[in-house]
Image (cartoon, rainbow, N blue to C red):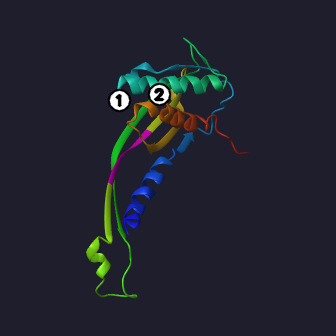
Amino acid sequence: MKTLKLIPIFLLLILSSCSSVTVYSDYDKNVDFAPYKTYAFFKPGIDKVEISDLDKRRILHAIEKEMQSKGFTKSEKPDLLVNIFTKSREQVDVNQFSAGWGYGWGWGWNPWMMYGGNQTTVSTSTEGTLYIDLIDAKKKEMIWQGEGIGVLTRNIDKKDERIAEFVSKILAQYPPQVKK
């Protein structure tokens, strides 16, 4: 019977550990992305982001790594300006589990419910959203935006890995695959 009470907790832990990042992107369909080869960070925008300096550096480092892997070069006179924006919200999940043991189907008295057959678990998590904006440096117009949504971690040992996952999945959608 105790094993049945622990099943919802184990399922919740398994689901939360497998959580991934959901990504979306949007872009200007009139832009040819091929000429863009250099980038720099848009410091005035990044300075306004309300997260810790440590997390900000983690994000910028992950973006640098991904941009370099795509063949971009960091430059004083860039083709693209990279800006970020973040937001977060607390999520509260309430799960009720009933063992469902008793005499037959339907309504009525169930002696097993008197002995803890119902189980309620409450868990909280922080869901974060990271936006990465790519701005044409000459025109000062946003040409592409990527968005990643997922559960954040407070575990210092896993923060770098989680942020790198957000950034790599977002930037995997750049450049957009233009449909002809």
Residue at (64%, 38%) from the top-left corner? 176
The residue positioned 65% from the left and 27% from the top of the image is: 70
Give the percent coordinates (x, y) of residue 84: 45, 30
Look at the image and give the residue range highlighted in magenta.
Answer: 123-129
Query: Is residue 66 visible in the rendered structure shown here?
Result: yes
**Dot 1: element:** loop
Which residue is more in the foreground, 35 or 9? 9
Label 2 residue SS: helix
Magenta span: chief secondary structure: strand
Q: Position of residue 102 (x, y in %)?
A: 36, 83
Q: Which residue is mark 2?
A: 59
Q: Residue furthest right?
A: 180
Question: Could you tell me the amino acid type at mark 1?
Answer: Ile
Do callouts 1 and 2 mark residues in contact (Cβ within 8 Å)? Answer: yes
What residue sits right under mark 1 in the picture?
A: 51
As drawn, 106 above or below 75 = below
Residue displayed at 52% across by 32% down: 164
**Is 35 situated left or right of 156 in this image?**
right
Image spot of residue 82 (x, y percent): 51, 25
Residue sticking out furthest to the top: 76
Q: Residue at x 51, y 33 (%)?
A: 161
